[in-house]
Amino acid sequence: MDGALKHSSGCCSIDSGRKSHHSDKVKNNIISRLNRIEGQVRGIKGLIEKNTYCDDVLNQIASVQAALNGVGKLLLEHHMKGCVIDRIQEGDMDVLDEILTTMNKLMK
């Protein structure tokens, strides 16, 4: 995922060699959120190790899922406003199928 967030010109994609062009502010926001989520996941692991009551662990898992959804929404917004529009303007209509596939994965 790191490669997809590097600041450069072009569009998002690790596999194709394209890169995103997020501002440093957006990139730092996403990284900060992911760092917090990483800490939450480690916390959940600790709860399991301490035999914490299942409902409490499940609530923490729901919190992590909501946080990941927030990161996904933010990234999707910037992807659509930047990368997708750029590719459509370049005449690359395949990006529409790509974004629909990605949205279906996010909505599972």
Image (cartoon, grey):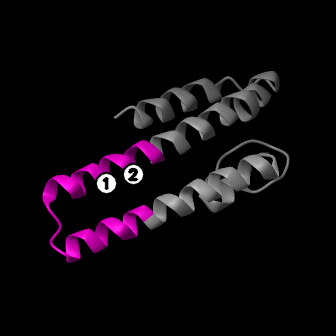
Image quadrant occupied by the C terminus: top left
* Image vertical order of residue 31 relative to residue 69, above or below: below
Q: Which residue is mark 2?
A: 64
Residue drawn 16% across the image and 52% down it: 55
Residue 76 is inside the magenta segment? no
Q: Which residue is outermost to the right? A: 9
Asked whether 16 or 40 is in front, the reply is 40
Q: Where is residue 91 shown, x and y percent of the image? A: 78, 23
Q: Residue furthest bottom?
A: 49
Q: Are marks 2 and 1 in contact (CB under 8 Å)?
A: yes
The quarter holding residue 86 reads top right
The local secondary structure at tag 1 comes to: helix
Label 2 – label 1 distance at C-alpha: 6 Å
Q: Amino acid at mark 1?
A: Gln
56 to 102, vertically: above or below: below
Res. 60 mark: 1
Q: Where in the figure is residue 103, as x and y percent of width and height?
A: 48, 30
Specify the amino acid type for callout 2.
Val
